Amino acid sequence: MIRITVLLAEDHMVVRQGLRAILSAEGDIEVVAEASNGRDAVALTRKLRPNVVVMDIAMPLLNGMEASRQILKTLPSTKILMLSAHSDDEYIDRVKAIGVAGYLVKQSSAEFLSKAIREVQKGNLVYSPAISKRLQNGSSNASRQTGDLISRKASRLTSREVELVQLVAEGKANKQIAVDLDISIKTVEKHRQAVMQKLDIHDTAGLTRYAIAAGIIENHVQVTII
């Protein structure tokens, strides 16, 4: 029997353990590693080269979208199955643009998750049933136009700048950002200024709103917008 190797990227340990237990019960699926943040997910995927990465879209240090973008840039044959609590059209459009193999809402059944892993490994695209139905009917033009505009802005940012935007939106001070990114505070300030110029945003509140709109952080994350 050919086994499908899987890496689980999920920041909540209880959820991660539950996913491992579900998948370990399947004879043809092997969980080879777990990651609790986006950076570790990228590093472990590059090291272990699993067949499939099950990626939570809301990850600390590096969100699931950016982690997926970095993985697919160096390992384009990797199949990424995105998990999210949200099924908004904007999120779907953005992950499709990245090139992930599937998008499941977290309410999906254990049976559907296992089936989805097998399908993406075969080269098929998989979405939760409600999302699949919407895609067949076509997303709204307004949603697509908004998503395209945000995607064009996001494409101007480097991976490091996306990391910085996420940390700013999560409420981190420059000193903590410097520690998290292993750079100087002066470099943080330079990156921050460069990001604001690229996005034509002039304050922290604007960066936070952009991060939510662009899916860099999910809108249920506790942040303060002034």
Image (spheres, helix red, strand yellow):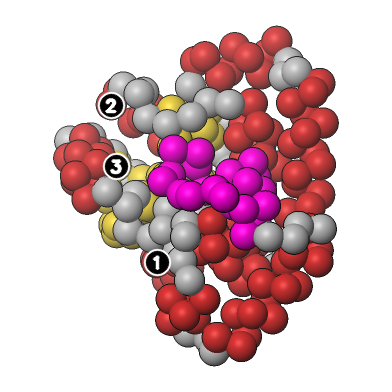
Choose mark 3 or mark 1, whichever is in front.
Answer: 1
Q: Secondary structure at mark 2?
A: helix
On the image, the x and y values in percent for residue 68 come to 55, 54
Vertical order, 183 against 217 (above or below): below
Q: Residue furthest front?
A: 226
The stretch drawn in magenta includes residue 10: no
Residue 19 seen in the current view = yes
Separation of marks 3 and 1 at Cα, in angstroms: 21 Å
State left or right for residue 4 relative to residue 13: right
Magenta residues span 204-226
Amino acid residing under circle 1 = Asp
Vertical order, 220 against 75 (above or below): above
Q: Give the residue drawn at x 42%, y 53%.
A: 59
Residue 120 seen in the current view = no
Q: Which mark is residue 110?
A: 2
Depth check, front residue: 135 or 224: 224
Quadrant in which residue 214 is drawn: top right
On the image, the x and y values in percent for residue 176 come to 43, 76
Q: Which mark is residue 32?
A: none
The residue that disc 3 covers is 29
Amino acid residing under circle 3 = Ile
Which badge, 3 or 2, comes first in the chain's sequence? Answer: 3
Vertical order, 181 against 62 (above or below): below
